[in-house]
Amino acid sequence: MASDTISIPEEHSIETQGIERVSSKARAHVRISDNFTIWFSANLVISTVALGAIAIPIFGLGFWDSVAAIMLFNILGSLPVAFFSTMGPKLGLRQMTITRFS
């Protein structure tokens, strides 16, 4: 029966808090390095690598030069996003909610 399978969302790591401010004790991931690894790994997908590999025939780069360009521009693209993502935990708000208050 459905009533026999009641589960608590916190046990399954489901976020139960809404868009209200998070207490200072519950805030996490306030360092840029925490957020950088998230955004860098999200940007390092096969489409990014394929797009960067086009530099070999178009710009005449070697293989390792092309790999260096892919890594460099992934790092440059991830740093601003990682920096702005640190504002959410510092202010106690969700990142999408910060734009309403600014």
Image (tube, rainbow, N blue to C red):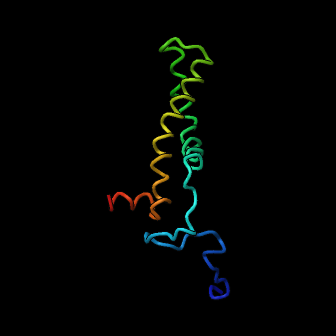
Q: Residue furthest top?
A: 60
Quadrant hosting residue 87: bottom left
Quadrant hosting residue 28: bottom right
At a point 50% along the width and 40% down the height, the residue shown is 79
Q: Position of residue 61 (x, y in %)?
A: 54, 14
Q: Position of residue 62 (x, y in %)?
A: 59, 13
At a point 54% along the width and 28% down the height, the residue shown is 72
Query: In the rendered view of the protein, which quadrant contains the C terminus?
Result: bottom left
Left or right of 92? Residue 44 is right
Left or right of 72? Residue 4 is right
At a point 57% along the width and 56% down the height, the residue shown is 29
Q: Position of residue 18 (x, y in %)?
A: 46, 72
Q: Nearer the viewer, residue 91 or 62?
A: 91
Q: Nearer the viewer, residue 59 or 80?
A: 80
Q: Position of residue 54 (x, y in %)?
A: 51, 21
Q: Nearer the viewer, residue 5 or 90?
A: 90
Q: Is residue 91 above or below residue 54?
A: below
Query: In the rendered view of the protein, which quadrant contains the N terminus?
Result: bottom right
Q: Is residue 95 above or below residue 66?
A: below
